[in-house]
Amino acid sequence: MNFMTFQQNLIGWFRLNQRPLPWRRHNKPYEVWVSEIMLQQTQMETVLPYYDRWMKAFPSLEALARADSKRVLKLWEGLGYYSRARNLHESAKTILRSHGGIFPDDHEKIRAIKGVGRYTAGAIASIAFNQDKPIVDGNILRVLSRVYAISKPIDVEKNKELFWKLQEDLIPKGNAREFNQALMELGALVCSSQNPACALCPIRRFCKAFKNKNPEDYPVRSRKKEMVK
């Protein structure tokens, strides 16, 4: 694969077709953090109005840290998984106390924030700070599965390391911010689970599943054992 052409085609497509999401305007760490936590277990369409209300109420990390917990939970009402709101609030207090209200830019310190896992840490580091950190979500799993025609089941935990390594190797040095978002956006808008719009895909020339005319065979999932009745 010609990595440079792959990267350029994908990023060029992203610049023209990306959705105008509010946290993309300035790539501020606080805004990216809040958006990524809200997007855990929640669809984009649901998150957008909640994000807008949240930012009007708590426009900065310091504003969130100093907010009343009841108001924080009230604004989260309807999003579910309330531990996410509690973790945001408590972590904002910790960052205000320990880092002077400045969101940490060190990947390990980001990973140590309560409620932040491997994917979320990589998303914050790459999108907010443009660090060359990989991210693998459902969209990226699907895209990479098809590009490389990977037959290993994605729902087997040990197999996911392959995708993390592939994604990391693909990142153009110094432009993880656009590339990582472009890969996710491609999965969301073009490389859908059913009826992918391959004719619109900027990287179809690199896609083995497209060449084999079987993109919907990927990603592969393990066969669940039938329950004994």
Image: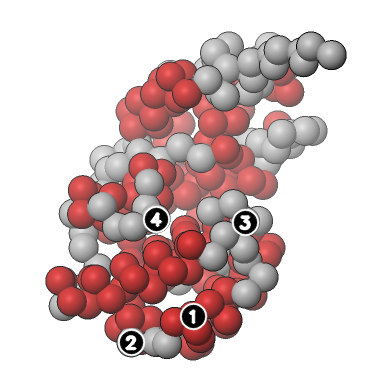
| CA separation in Å, label 2 and label 4 | 19 Å
Q: Element under label 4?
A: loop
Label 1 vs label 3, nearer the camera? 1
Task: Please report the residue visible at 35 percent of the width from the left and 25 percent of the height from the top.
Answer: 165
Task: Name the image quarter holding residue 179.
Answer: top left
Q: Which residue is mark 3?
A: 42
Marks 3 and 1: in contact by CB < 8 Å? Answer: no
- Percent position of residue 113, x then y: 29, 57
Q: Residues within 10 Å of mark 4 (few under 14, many from 20)?
A: some
Residue tagged 1: 72
Which circle's residue, 1 or 4, is located before the other in the chain? Answer: 1
Image quadrant where residue 69 sits? bottom left
**Quarter placement of the C terminus:** top right
Q: Is residue 91 visible in this depiction of the protein? A: yes
> Along the line of sight, which residue is nearer the eye, 17 or 43?
43
| Residue count near mark 1 (Cα–Cα under 10 Å), binned few <14, some 14–19, many ≥20 | many
Alpha carbon distance from label 4 to label 3: 15 Å
The image's colouring method is secondary structure
How much space separates mark 2 and mark 3, taking CA atoms? Answer: 26 Å
Q: Residue at x 50, y 46 (%)?
A: 182
Q: Secondary structure at mark 3?
A: loop
Q: Position of residue 181 (x, y in %)?
A: 47, 49
Amino acid on which the number 3 mark rests in the picture: Thr
Q: Secondary structure at mark 1?
A: helix
- Compute the Cα span from label 2 to label 1: 10 Å
Residue under circle 4? 115
Residue assigned mark 2: 66
**Residue drawn at (23%, 71%), measured in percent from left and top?**
95
Tell me which amino acid carries mark 2.
Arg
Residue kind at label 4, given as amino acid type = Gly
